[in-house]
């Protein structure tokens, strides 16, 4: 790349940052009604331009097949009529959420007569860097708009045509509602230098970065970002079948947790089974997984009972497969399951299948992951399923945002202090 080309990318990104900051100032005081209208308008535009979006997605899918993308990655990339319906429903759900901006989180009076309020405010400008999922364009654009933030979206080259088509619908919604088109910007170049410019913060015009993608992308963002990051490095998710778990539930939940969509970050990657139910639960659960096309990598007990299983290595307990593969281990107790999870987890999501309240309480109290689930699939680790309308990502850190990042997590707060002439002695 020539110096001139690098300068062009830097100038492009700097200009986007300036325009985003100006748009953020408008959004910070935009009415709830106007933001609602923009989101509904975007949903209508998506429906109107459905055929064009599907055609652009097929361009991305064909390019992906030619590059030898895996089945799991192609599934992430694929748009169908049903998935577009889901995006539209997500936009409408977000539109209907209460507007968080200006919400009084807490208020109190001091003995000296001062009245203090803690009030939600937008963060400002969000930078979202993502890879192959084109629906992130809509989720991120809608959630940032609803929370009064401007956003700069940088999708991967894998989904570039699909994402641009969806972005055009979001802009159509903004303009129809009289809001600035620059409130939701999509980086027009696939040049990787654009990511580097965003990570530098665009001269102070980006307030926070959210990466959505694989381990390599997230690691780069966390290493290079000069602004705060909401991120999870990987989704190494566990499901534990306790000794009191019902067999039918265990079969249904584990199969769904692993196989519903193997490429999402909430997919179970490691299954732990209490030793007391090896004789009753292990073979039916694994048989159901195998019937769905799942490869089993197991410890010594699993290898002895399941002829088709492959011996698990130490690396398997550390691997986010994002594919139809699961590692399976038999454990002595709930304490042993907790110890394994705390040793290997990426602190994303863990589930326990159990009818013993004491086991569930111990599991919930002693595992420090962002999301803990009892008697349900780990694939519910999703902002839409939490009632957020969607998510801009799932954060596994402990500062500011944790778990699905929705509209409330995209706000900060300020204090409003009202007095009647008080002075401090």
Image: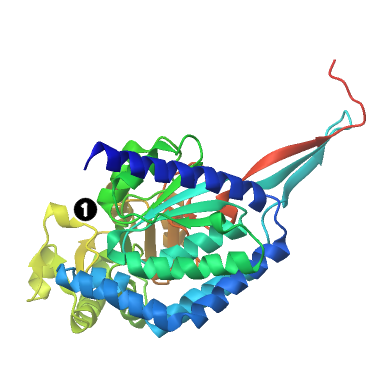
The spot of residue 48 in percent (x, y) is 51, 82
User: What residue is rendered at 43% in x and 55% in y?
Assistant: 153
Is residue 172 placed above or below 225 in the rendered structure? below
Pick the residue in front: 87 or 416.
Answer: 87
Query: Toward which corner of the image does residue 115 lie, by quadrant?
Result: top right
Q: Would residue 164 be found to the left or right of residue 236 on screen?
A: right
* Residue neighbourhood size for the residue with mark 1, other residues' Cα within 10 Å, grouped as few (<14), some (14–19), many (≥20): some
Q: In the rendered view, does 137 fall on the left or right side of 59?
A: right
Is 51 located above or below residue 9 in the figure? Answer: below
Above or below residue 46? Residue 103 is: above
Q: Position of residue 149 (x, y in %)?
A: 58, 51
In this orientation, does residue 94 appear? Answer: no
Residue at 70% from the left image edge and 55% from the top image edge = 30
Quarter of the figure with residue 81: bottom left
Residue 46 on image: x %, y %: 50, 77
Question: Residue 135, percent across and down?
Answer: 42, 68
Q: Quadrant of the N terminus?
A: top left
Residue at the right extreme, as displayed: 420
246 w.r.t. 125: above or below = below
Residue at (47, 34) in percent of width and height: 203
Camera-side residue of 285 and 294: 294
Q: How many marks?
A: 1
Secondary structure of the residue carrying tag 1 is: helix
The residue beneath circle 1 is 318
Along the line of sight, which residue is nearer the eye, 386 or 14?
14
Residue 153 visible to the viewer = yes
* Residue 162 relative to residue 102: left or right: left
């Amino acid at each position: 790349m020539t110096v001139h080309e690098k300068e062009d990318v830097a100038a492009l990104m700097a200009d986007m940052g300036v325009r985003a900051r100006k748009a953020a100032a408008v959004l910070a005081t935009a009415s709830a009604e106007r933001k609602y209208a923009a989101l509904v308008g975007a949903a209508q535009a998506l429906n109107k331009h459905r055929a064009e979006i599907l055609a652009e997605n097929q361009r991305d899918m064909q390019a992906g097949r030619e590059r030898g993308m895996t089945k799991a990655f192609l599934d992430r990339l694929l748009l169908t009529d049903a998935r577009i319906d889901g995006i539209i429903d997500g936009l409408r759900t977000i539109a209907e959420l209460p507007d968080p901006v200006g919400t009084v989180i807490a208020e109190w009076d001091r003995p000296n007569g001062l009245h203090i309020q803690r009030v939600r405010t937008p963060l400002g400008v969000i930078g979202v860097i993502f890879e192959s999922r084109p629906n992130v364009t809509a989720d991120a654009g809608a959630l940032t708009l609803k929370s009064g933030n401007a956003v700069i979206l940088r999708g991967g080259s894998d989904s570039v045509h699909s994402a641009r088509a969806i972005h055009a619908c979001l802009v159509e919604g903004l303009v129809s509602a009289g809001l600035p088109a620059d409130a939701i910007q999509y980086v027009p170049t696939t040049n990787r230098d654009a990511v580097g410019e965003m990570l530098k913060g665009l001269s102070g015009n980006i307030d926070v970065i959210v990466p959505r993608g694989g381990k390599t992308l997230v690691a780069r963002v966390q290493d290079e970002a000069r602004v705060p990051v909401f991120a999870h490095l990987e989704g190494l998710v566990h499901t534990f079948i306790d000794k009191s778990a019902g067999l039918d539930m265990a079969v249904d939940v584990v199969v769904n947790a692993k196989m519903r969509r193997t490429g999402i970050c909430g997919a179970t990657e490691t299954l732990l089974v209490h030793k007391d139910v090896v004789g009753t639960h292990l073979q039916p659960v694994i048989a159901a997984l195998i019937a769905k096309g799942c490869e089993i990598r197991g410890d010594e007990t699993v290898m002895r009972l399941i002829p088709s299983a492959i011996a698990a290595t130490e690396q398997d307990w550390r691997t986010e497969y994002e594919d139809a593969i699961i590692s399976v281990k038999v454990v002595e107790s709930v304490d042993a399951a907790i110890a394994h999870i705390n040793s290997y987890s990426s602190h994303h999501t863990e589930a326990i299948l159990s009818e013993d309240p004491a086991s569930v309480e111990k599991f919930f109290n002693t595992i420090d992951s962002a999301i803990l689930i009892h008697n349900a699939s780990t694939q519910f680790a999703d902002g839409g399923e939490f009632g957020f309308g969607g998510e801009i990502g799932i954060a596994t850190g402990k500062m500011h945002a944790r778990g699905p990042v929705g509209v409330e997590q995209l706000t900060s707060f300020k204090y409003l202090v009202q007095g009647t002439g008080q002075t401090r002695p």
